[in-house]
Image (spheres, grey):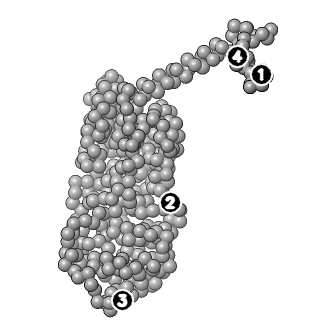
Amino acid sequence: MFRKCRSIRADPSRLLWRRDGGGQLLQAECMHARTREDDGRRGSEKGAREARGPEFRLHKSKGQHILTNPRVLDSIVRRAELKPGDTVLEIGPGTGNLTLKLLEVSRKVVAVEIDGRMVDALRKRVADRGFEDRLTVIQKDALKTQFPPFDIVVANIPYQISSPLIIKLVYGKIQFRSATLLLQKEFARRLLANPGDSEYNRLAVNVKLVADVEFAMDVSKRDFLPVPKVNSSVVIIRPKTELPEVNLAEWWAFTRTCFGKKNKTLGATFKQKRKLMEIFKTSTLAGLKKDVAITNDDGISGVSVEDGDIDEEGNSEEESLSSSVPEGEMNLFKEKIVGVLRAEGFEDKRPSKLSNDELLHLLAVLNHAGVYFHNQAES
């Protein structure tokens, strides 16, 4: 409840008294100050509406959350370390809040956006700023389209496509300097995880084989419209200049085998009957080919959504092998694998504790012993 202040030190026309539930006076508050506060709030809301762009329904289920905080947008652009001659790939530009800031400091922006409403709003805002000649919009699914050449990636990526999109970027043919990505915080932690961390997983293993991942900053969920359920983080991915000599298809199949149960010892994993049968079949066919060609437009072949592994589907010469292998032959094969694990000190180790160097070494010695994980006859 409010009434005008009667203090001799106060202008009665400017102050309000506020009482608590028991009627006790709590504080005097200037009505003009409150008016300025309300005006500021209305101005902030107006700025948010302008940042959001045209009024239309945003779909949370599709990951449509518009970043509206200008300080965060500026920080992302600054951390991306753009150069005036850069061509920037932006995936999911939305209504263009980040796009406009990228256009201010780069030569060109290639924006990939599947929602036609967003595309219309983006084109209009960019045209109003006179940047239309430096913007190229590709209205397609980012996972299915072939990207044109670019120097750097800056993007607010929907959670649903984060994993396959990152794999597409780091294992693609296009060489780029870095990717500054706004991701869900939980996903970013998985991507940043190191051996021994509870979040360490196959995605981190496969990405860090070919790139370095750096944490940049956290972003509050309150900086988005509509407000998502979780906070976000910005990470920077920098492709490595020197890559290990490894067959990528073999590596992906190997990490899938190891990280299916990442906290189980390797000795226990490779003694499973079903797993042994799968490895026996791929190892039997390995003599047919030794090089796996990766043939699609982006330099990768069927990548799974969650963990970035090759999706081994379709028919192959594997089907010609009998599902029944003599017990003696299978026992010899198991002894060979366990012998390698024991000799190299890996039998009692768990994948969740192993570095990429250790995993690469183990794969090399297994391959040398004639144990293979990818069905090379499919390539």
Looking at marks 1 and 2 on the same chain, the residue that comes earlier in the sequence is marked by 1
Gap in Å between the C-alphas at discs 2 and 4?
53 Å
* Identity, as a three-letter code, of the amino acid under mark 4: Phe
* Identity, as a three-letter code, of the amino acid under mark 3: Asn
Can see residue 178? no
- In front of the other: label 4 or label 1? 1
Q: Residue at x 36, y 29 (%)?
A: 56
- In front of the other: label 2 or label 4? 4
**Which residue is labeled 2 in the image?**
199
**Which residue is labeled 1 in the image?**
23
**Which residue is labeled 4 in the image?**
2
Q: Residue at x 45, y 80 (%)?
A: 267
Q: Which quarter shows the C terminus?
A: bottom left
Question: Is 368 placed above or below 165 here?
Answer: below
- Percent position (x, y) of residue 181? 42, 45
- In front of the other: label 1 or label 3? 1
* Identity, as a three-letter code, of the amino acid under mark 1: Gly
Q: Secondary structure at mark 1?
A: loop
Residue toward you, 16 or 224: 16
- Percent position (x, y) of residue 298? 26, 54
Looking at marks 4 and 3 on the same chain, the residue that comes earlier in the sequence is marked by 4
Question: Is 46 placed above or below 156 here?
Answer: above
Gap in Å between the C-alphas at discs 4 and 1?
10 Å
**Which residue is labeled 3 in the image?**
331
- Percent position (x, y) of residue 138? 26, 39
Looking at marks 2 and 4 on the same chain, the residue that comes earlier in the sequence is marked by 4
Q: Quadrant of residue 37?
A: top right
* Identity, as a three-letter code, of the amino acid under mark 2: Glu
Gap in Å between the C-alphas at discs 4 and 3?
86 Å
